[in-house]
Amino acid sequence: MIEDYLLHHLPKDYTYHTIEHIRDVVKQSERIAKKEKISKEDVADVKLAAWLHDIGYIWEPNRHEARGAEYAATILTALNFPTQKINKITGMILATKIPQSPKNILEQIICDADLDYLGRDDYASISLLLLQELRLKKEISEDDWINLQHSFLSNHSYFTKTANATRNTAKAKLLASIKKNLKK
């Protein structure tokens, strides 16, 4: 139901914030959650938050986390979810706002899943999709893009033990490679 809605309503000109990105965040959320040994109920909640974390792009890209959390609260209330669960899910969605500031392990998991690609072999292809999407709003030179990536990666930290163990080495290599491309 949610996947279908996203597939038909996310902006078609977006190249990064797509159904593929959301599916990847769901997959990585589940992977990290299981490695972190959280309960099955919490795994399900993290996956639901992952499905909804970028839904706000449909209506308000600049406030997509807040708009997505509002939408999630509305539909989960209509589905008679308990208030505590709604707050947990909307908290996870809001935690993905950059700069990320998760308050608990579930929020840490979704934050790490959302930026999992920063420490993966497919970083280059995924970051190009982000660059294409950003260029829909304004022109970004190659040098500006390299500087932006350097700054972002330098200031980014994973939160969970799992993400730190599985993604930090590749992210450090990537950052070293980007540093070589910086104009002096």
Image (cartoon, helix red, strand yellow):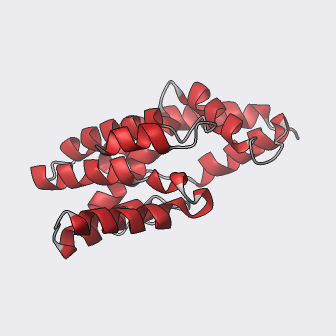
Identify which residue is drawn at 76% across, 44% down: 147
How many numbered discs? 0
Q: Is 162 situated left or right of 70 in this image?
A: left
Q: Position of residue 13 (x, y in %)?
A: 64, 37
Check the image and name the residue furthest to the left: 40
Identify which residue is drawn at 12% across, 54% down: 41
Judge whether 142 appears above or below 10 on screen.
above
Q: Position of residue 40 (x, y in %)?
A: 11, 49
Identify which residue is drawn at 86% across, 38% down: 183
Identify which residue is drawn at 85% across, 38% down: 141
Q: Is residue 50 visible?
A: yes
Residue 181, quarter of the rendered image = top right
Q: Position of residue 65 (x, y in %)?
A: 48, 62
Check the image and name the residue furthest to the bottom: 83
Q: Is residue 169 visible?
A: no
Residue 14, quarter of the rendered image = top right
The image quadrant where one finds the C terminus is top right
In this view, the residue in front, 96 or 83, is 83
Q: Is 43 situated left or right of 18 in this image?
A: left
Q: Is 140 situated left or right of 116 in this image?
A: right
The image quadrant where one finds the N terminus is top left
Q: Position of residue 105 (x, y in %)?
A: 28, 60
